[in-house]
Image (tube, rainbow, N blue to C red):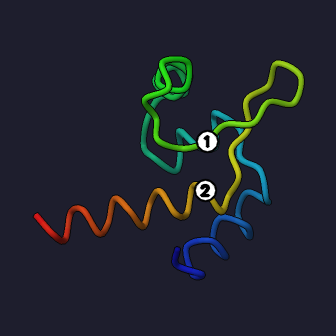
Amino acid sequence: MSLLTHAYLLEKYGPLLTTEQLGSVLHLEPGTVRNQTGAQTLGIPVIRRGKTPLYHAQDVAAYLDQLRSLSQAA
């Protein structure tokens, strides 16, 4: 995981991202993020605080770096 990506996410959003914030980072509608989270196809682990889904900035940074490495390999 890139420390730069992680530092950026921590600075902008804090250690936990909401569905809306994750949608903004991934350029997806919040509904799409909710649907993919429910279907377990998002690829980012989710934690729940009550009924609220949250995503660790570290997991999001690792996912973004994985996407970048896949696009560079293609």
Residue picked out by circle 2 = 59
Which residue does the image show at 55% across and 73% down from the upper left? 5
Residue picked out by circle 1 = 45
Image location of residue 35, percent across then percent down: 49, 18
Identified by mark 2, the residue type is Asp
Q: In the displayed structure, would residue 56 be above or below residue 66?
A: above
Which residue does the image show at 42% across and 67% down from the upper left? 65
Image location of residue 32, percent across then percent down: 46, 23
In the rendered structure, are the residues bearing label 1 and label 2 in contact, judged by CB atoms less than 8 Å apart?
Answer: yes
Which residue does the image show at 61% across and 56% down from the upper left? 59
Image location of residue 47, percent across then percent down: 75, 36
Identified by mark 1, the residue type is Pro
Q: In this view of the protein, which residue sits in the foreground, 19 or 68? A: 68
- Tell me the quadrant of the picture where the C terminus can be found: bottom left
In the displayed structure image, the side of residue 62 where residue 49 appears, left or right: right
Gap in Å between the C-alphas at discs 1 and 2?
7 Å
Residue 71 in which image quadrant: bottom left
Q: In the displayed structure, would residue 46 be above or below residue 38?
A: below
Comes first in the chain, label 1 or label 2: 1
SS state under label 2: helix
Q: Residue furthest right?
A: 50
Q: Residue furthest left?
A: 74
Q: Residues within 10 Å of mark 2 (few under 14, many from 20)?
A: some
